[in-house]
Amino acid sequence: MNKLVAYFSASGSTAKLAKTLAAATDAALFEIRPAVPYERRDLNWMDKKSRSTVEMQDPNCRPALAGDAAPVAEADVIFLGFPIWWYREPSIIDSFLDAYDFSGKTLVPFFTSGGSDLGEGQGRIEGLAKGARVLSGRRFAARASESELQGWISSLHIDYEEAAMKKLISFLLLLAIVLASAGCGAPAQTPADPSPAAAEEPVSESAEAASAQEPDDVPEAEAEAPAAEEAPETATLVVYFSATGTTRSVAEQIAALTGAELFEIVPAEPYTAEDLNYGDHSTRATVEQNDPDARPEIANEISLEGCTTLYLGYPIWWGDSPRILSTFVESHDFTGITVIPFCTSGSSGPGRTGEALGELAGTGTFLASTRLRRGMSDAELQDWIDSRG
């Protein structure tokens, strides 16, 4: 039984999950790569003209694929991984599904996101993977363990023997067609030689045809150039969540002093003044903060590719970081990144919030958090930045 884990990853989160899944299933691993890599500005969900936004608004968009052909023909069960973009699968996944023949195969979607589910994407994948048995997709954190993934796989009840039998039946039917074609019009006493090579030839041609249809028009050198040029600009990021504007003000000041790119963590459901009423134990913020497993959904996404230093800002809620920060750190791979947390509050200190976020992330180097105040002078803030370096 041949298994394949094929995945697309822009920020590294899905790549990390896919590698764990491949290890848990003893499957081959294949990365779905766009001919033109996505740059940081391409993933700016707030810009309606950014590449990803334009692509996701066009259901017929099919970004070109790069790299060698995927070993789809040899696989019986294919796990298909991707991040959620605009509440469905990225358009590059549609390109992948269009490029190959999935007839008779079992296709299992898995995905990463700040909190969004696959939504209409499940139906789209089923429609594009013609002839495949498509199982219901599931969302995982990037740091999901092998045991967690193996438990999920067991719950799918994939009948590998049945899949292998279907493959054998398909081969026998194909062999019968070859024999029938060879026998048409030929003398009965000279049947065609039904050799394995002859029987498998149509399969090979089918695979080549699928590969030829891959929209791989951009030269590799040209595709890599933009990513290399963007690297210096993406080395430092300032990422923040702010419900009242206080943390935003400090984050903007840090970005201005460091020349870093600024990214706001936007909740899918914005917090209202009523949500932040700490005197009411039934309010949204209070309920979330009292539940360590709460993970509020994030509406936007950012790639951390190329980032080496990340300033992470947030207010202090009930003596802790807001749960949406837990959503964020669990959704990204911080390998090779130094994370410098900072917080704002009326009087509460940061406690161990920085270290706690690092424990949730499981990757990267997280420093202890520092409480900063709105209205700090540039000189004061620069001193703090220098002390973190």
Image (tube, rainbow, N blue to C red):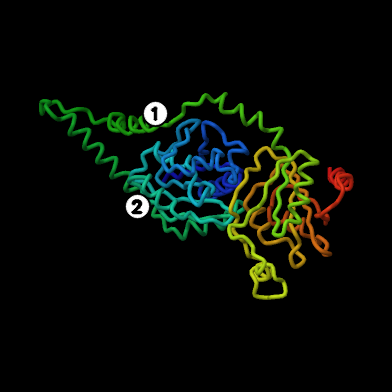
- 376 versus 64 height, above or below: below
Task: Tell me the amino acid under the disc marked 1.
Answer: Ala
* Residue at mark 2: 162
Q: Estimate the spatial distance between the alpha carbons at disc 2 and disc 1, rounded to whole Å.
A: 31 Å
Disc 2 versus disc 1: nearer the observer? 1
Residue closer to the observer: 243 or 104 = 243
User: Residue at position x 70%, y 71% from top?
Assistant: 277
Depth check, front residue: 73 or 335 = 335
Residue at the location (66% across, 52% down)?
Answer: 265
At mark 2, the secondary structure is: helix
- The first of marks 2 and 1 along the sequence is 2
Disc 1 secondary structure class: helix
> Is 130 or 58 nearer to us in this picture?
58
Amino acid beneath label 2: Glu
Q: Position of residue 243 (x, y in %)?
A: 69, 59
Is 284 on the left-hand or right-hand side of 5?
right
The image shows residue 61 at horizontal and vertical percentages of 44, 38
Residue 252 position, x and y percent, is 75, 47
**Is residue 328 in sight in this rendering?**
yes
Q: Residues within 10 Å of mark 1 (few under 14, many from 20)?
A: few
Relative image position of residue 278 (x, y in whole percent): 72, 71
- Per the image, the residue denoted by label 1 is 212
Q: Residue at x 18, y 29 (%)?
A: 182
Quadrant occupied by the C terminus: top right
Above/below status of 290 relative to 261: below
Residue 370 in sight in this render: no
Q: Which mark is residue 259?
A: none
Residue at left offset 87%, top offset 45%: 387
